Amino acid sequence: MYRALSLMAVLYGAFLRHCISSQRIKTHSVYFPNTSLVDPEFDYESLLNAIQQEKSFDSVLLLHQPSHHQGKMLEIFLKYQAAKMPKLIIEGHDLQLRYMAIFNSEILAVVLTTGQMDERLMHTLAQTMDYMRQTRILMVATNISDINQFKDNILKLCDNYRMTNVIMSLQTSNHSKHITTVFHKLKPYPSYHWQRLTLSPHNKDPFYPQEWLNLQNRTLVTYPDQFPPISMVFYDHRGKLQISGYAGLLVLAFAQHYNANLQYIKPLEEGKWVHFFDIANMVADGLLDLPMSVIDTISVPMLNMSCPVVVNKSFFMVPLSTPFTIREIFTLLMNGYFFGSIIVMSLLLSIVHTLTDLFFEGTLEYMNFLINSKVMPGVLGQSFVERVTKLIGLRMIYFFIGFVGLNISTQFSANIHSLFTSPPYHRQLEKLSDLEHSPVKILMEKTDATLLYEWVGKHRSIVTITENSTFFVDAMRNLNTSYGYIIESELWDMYNRRQEYFRRKVFHIPPGMRYIDMLHWNLRLQYNSVYKEAIDQFIYRAYETGLMNAWMTQTYLDMSKMKRVPMYDPYQQKQSGVLRVNDFFWVWILLVIGLFDGFVVFLMELLIHHCCLKN
């Protein structure tokens, strides 16, 4: 365990160095040409060139009000690289367009407004830049009467529409008609506010820095689903609550690395399992910022997710076939072949013995054709009294009776020894169709069954649905062989690793019971989440540095320590014990049937004897 922790610490150190080096590359200096801020015709072309130099963009999205006052300003941006820079121009508020669905995402959005803030124009911008609202935005406002009110209104709209990369140019004029251009940069963390931007050759700060590199102790609301290995909550040896699981450790490391403060939406309780779909709904409702849970891409659109945290497979985990019980072994021993051999040989030898008595001694008893007092015990391997006779044929019959009895009893004894020492196994479950003729059914939690309603509808006969989530989790964790389960490859690897310590494996995944060969599991994010770029980059770096593998290993160690993986071996060596009464169930049944038949025959004999006396 300590070796795994040391490896995790080394990987996390390498991860931090890798992220820091990446950040240094991104925050290179950008020098803006010496332009006067009081120039009535500010050199916006130089500003665009400086932004292009910092990070290139392929097209320009230009939004403006239908006003003749903006003609000159509009012409400045239309002429910028007119030959090779495509531009999408939106005038007014009527156009409904999602830019991301048509054009390249590396764009610069330019918003021209005059006089006062236009909320409808900002709404059009938000709709156009849906799912890319963290794109760079340059707002140019002219003839603003109340600057502070204008800034506050724009700030609220940026917060509402979750825009984080905004530079605002404000042009104002005083009574002497002296025009002043002032720039402000939006700072979204820890809360939205404006910062004065100074454009000079000595300013080395980028225009659009990656603000998420430092969240400034911003509070992120989260909550774990407590379904290992995704996330789990447990008390350590000091009695403190700890978080584990690859999703839980991912969010913890993200908050630590990017200087965020994690806050749980409600107090943590050990073992309180919450379905991942309920966690996803909490994110969609705006209750959670970053969940300690993942959800598949089938249930939620990809645009509202992070990049994949894990890519795995989904299987049906079913119990391996079990050996026959002693009660079932007796059903194998006393089968149709065994009783058929006794009945056929008894009838044949009884008929031959009775005919021999008839032909050579002239005696005949019709009941001897069915049941002969000398043949039946001999066939069953019991002792019987031979008639003293000189007939060689009758002696040969007695020899065959003894031989048949010896053969049947020897075979029965050999079968008992073989089946008791090495009992056979039931038929192995290989396909879903095998479950239709098996007592084993696929156990599903109600929410899972709702999500997979199409599959459940097709295979309703092999599915058992429970509303008790605790029972479902405990049944899977304790390897309850009464059911099969849908399981992902990460959890199956942990369960299978644990089964290596068992005397015999309990569950397996047959080749014919694969459900989905590739399934993406992502973090559910809020609509147009401001953390998408940050968490995506963090996940990429975690895989590059091997930190995700370390988290998986740490999760397995924590699960083993807290007994969240199968611990009990149902096939462990047991002490020898005596046979129980229940083991001889079919023997007792045969005994009862035999006694009943004997009683019926006895009554028939009494009845026949009584009738004969009357006659």
Image (spheres, rainbow, N blue to C red):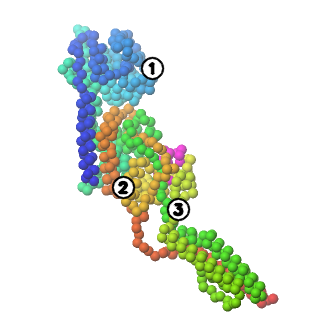
The quadrant holding residue 278 is top left
Identify which amino acid the numbered label 2 is placed on: Arg
**x then y, percent, for residue 521:** 41, 42
Q: Secondary structure at mark 1?
A: loop
Q: CA distance from mark 3 to mark 2?
A: 29 Å
Q: Secondary structure at mark 2?
A: loop
Q: Residue furthest left?
A: 202
As drawn, 501 above or below 350: above
Q: Residue at x 48, y 58 (%)?
A: 320
Q: Residue furthest top?
A: 176
**Residue 584: within the magenta?**
no
Mark on residue 426?
A: 3
Q: Residue at x 48, y 70 (%)?
A: 421
Identify which amino acid the numbered label 3 is placed on: His
Q: Residue at x 30, y 43 (%)?
A: 547
Q: Residue furthest front?
A: 392
**x then y, percent, for residue 130:** 40, 28
Q: CA distance from mark 3 to mark 1?
A: 70 Å
- Residue topped by disc 2: 564
